Amino acid sequence: MGYVERNTWSQVIASAAGTVVYLALVLPQLWSTPVGQIAWQWPMVWTILGAIVVSIVISILWGIGAGMRDPDEEHRADQRDREIEHLGDRVGQAFLVIGGLAALTLAMVQAEWFWIGNAVFFGFFLSAFVGGIARIVVYRRGMP
Amino acid sequence: MVKPTRITNTIRATRETAGMTQAEVARRIGVTRQTLIAIEQGKYSPSLELAFQLSRLFGVAIDDLFHYPADADASAGA
């Protein structure tokens, strides 16, 4: 597995883990607290920052392990990496648009901030996650 | 569903005949070893520029390195 593919795996794992933690913190409140009083802002900020840090840590540790096995490994993206990255971006972009449109619609109907913030959050998450999965599939199975 | 490319190649056999390693070929054409492996396995079709670099590196014609099935022209246009 190459350097860029490993980083993609790290980002996918970290973003999924961060979102699971966020849902575990916020979802239980939905049943017990009025939506307007749910404490979702800081859990969202911390899980986003946490996911970034976890992604970097996984990349570094994985990179150290890979470097010990193959000291000559190159730490750069080549033409294929860039093509796969663009493909992943195109796949993920759709979810970014869906999240933005959902947030816009919710704002128009004057929904709670909770729903608007979470629509944007899940748009970002799905964009990163599905785009990352698309990249991994292409790395494993080949370019379509 | 990801369809594999219909372009096949003889890069692995040509490389082995030339006595070169994947790492050496990858370094000389400016790609990572993983990309060369993907090209050899038919999971990635290189750009025309990379194809020319490979052909010059091995001293063979592009047509001897890469093959495209004759019926692919008809099905690609369908």
Image: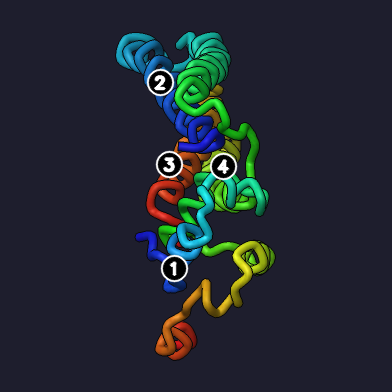
Whether residue A48 can be seen here: no
Q: Position of residue A32 (x, y in %)?
A: 32, 9
Looking at marks 3 and 2 on the same chain, the residue that comes earlier in the sequence is marked by: 2
Residue wearing tag 1? B5
The residue closer to the viewer here, B62 or A59, is B62
Cβ atoms under marks 4 and 1 closer than 8 Å: no
Name the residue: 35% across, 60% down. B1
Name the residue: 53% across, 30% down. A7
Q: Position of residue B33 (x, y in %)?
A: 53, 45
Q: Nearer the viewer, mark 2 or mark 1?
A: 1
The residue closer to the viewer here, A87 or A42, is A87
Residue wearing tag 3? A133
Q: Nearer the viewer, mark 4 or mark 2?
A: 2
Q: Position of residue A79 (x, y in %)?
A: 64, 52
Label 2 residue SS: helix
Residue wearing tag 2? A17
Whether residue B21 can be seen here: yes
Amino acid bearing label 3: Ile
Are marks 3 and 2 in one subunit? yes
Give the alpha-carbon distance from disc 3 to disc 2, as whole Å: 14 Å
Residue at mark 3: chain: A
In the figure, A140 relative to A54: above or below? Answer: below
